[in-house]
Amino acid sequence: MKAKMFRALLPLAIVFTMVSCSSDSSEGSSADKKIVTSYNYNDSELKIVSLVNNYRQSIGLNALEVINHISYKSQEHNIYMIDNKVVNHDYFQQRANNLIEVLGATRVGENIAYNYQTPESAMSAWLNSPDHKANIEGDYTHIGISITVDEATGKKYYTNMFIKKK
């Protein structure tokens, strides 16, 4: 009796297991592979782009072109940091992989900042940090930026991503 019940339920268990399990790479869903073409920039975000490009040009480097998809990925990271009450580069590789797959990036960099009141103060902090400065001065062609305010605390989260396209 038990053996018959086991044989009858085994196919159901297998089907349930196959349907209910998901992979570790939920970051890489097919919806995540579509390019985001619109992004509503606030004045502070536009100011960061201007500050980065003015600085780059002042040292003889090319200005970076804004791509809305990069800003969207930056905003996703800000929301993640706010929701999780962290300031870090968690899941950078997933964001970078998305920019490689969707935009054809050959190189990706990222700067984050937290609780700076003005774009100028965030830019100054980045330029005073060797790793952040290296990203700003890096061999990149495009940029994306998001500045997101945590509604609960009023603090600003900055994520600035850079890519190089072929």
Image: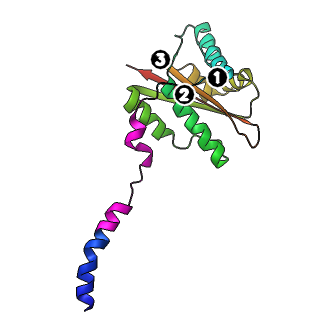
Q: Which residues are magenta?
A: 15-36
**Badge 3 or badge 2: first in the primary sequence:** 2
**Residue at 39 percent of width and 56 percent of height:** 22
In the depicted structure, whether residue 33 falls above or below residue 8: above
- Binning the other alpha carbons within 10 Å of mark 1 as few (below 14), some (14 to 19) or many (20 upward) gives many
Q: Is residue 36 left or right of residue 59?
A: left
Disc 3 to disc 1: CB gap under 8 Å: no
Quarter containing the N terminus: bottom left
In the depicted structure, whether residue 69 falls above or below residue 61: below
Q: Is residue 16 magenta?
A: yes
The residue pinned by badge 2 equals 71
Between 70 and 105, the residue placed more toward the observer is 70
The quadrant in which residue 122 appears is: top right
Q: Position of residue 55 (x, y in %)?
A: 63, 13
Q: Amino acid at mark 2?
A: Ser
- Res. 136 mark: none
Disc 1 to disc 2: CB gap under 8 Å: yes
How many tags in the picture? 3
Q: Position of residue 96 (x, y in %)?
A: 46, 34
The residue pinned by badge 3 equals 141
User: From the viewer's perspective, is the residue at label 3 or at label 2 nearer?
Assistant: 2
Q: Is residue 19 left or right of residue 1?
A: right
Q: Position of residue 150 (x, y in %)?
A: 71, 39
Q: Is residue 128 magenta?
A: no
- Res. 45 mark: 1
Between 155 and 63, the residue placed more toward the observer is 155
**Cα–Cα span, label 1 and label 2:** 9 Å
User: Does residue 49 appear in the picture of this structure?
Assistant: yes
The quadrant in which residue 53 appears is: top right
**Residue at 65 percent of width and 20 percent of height:** 48
Between 37 and 67, the residue placed more toward the observer is 37
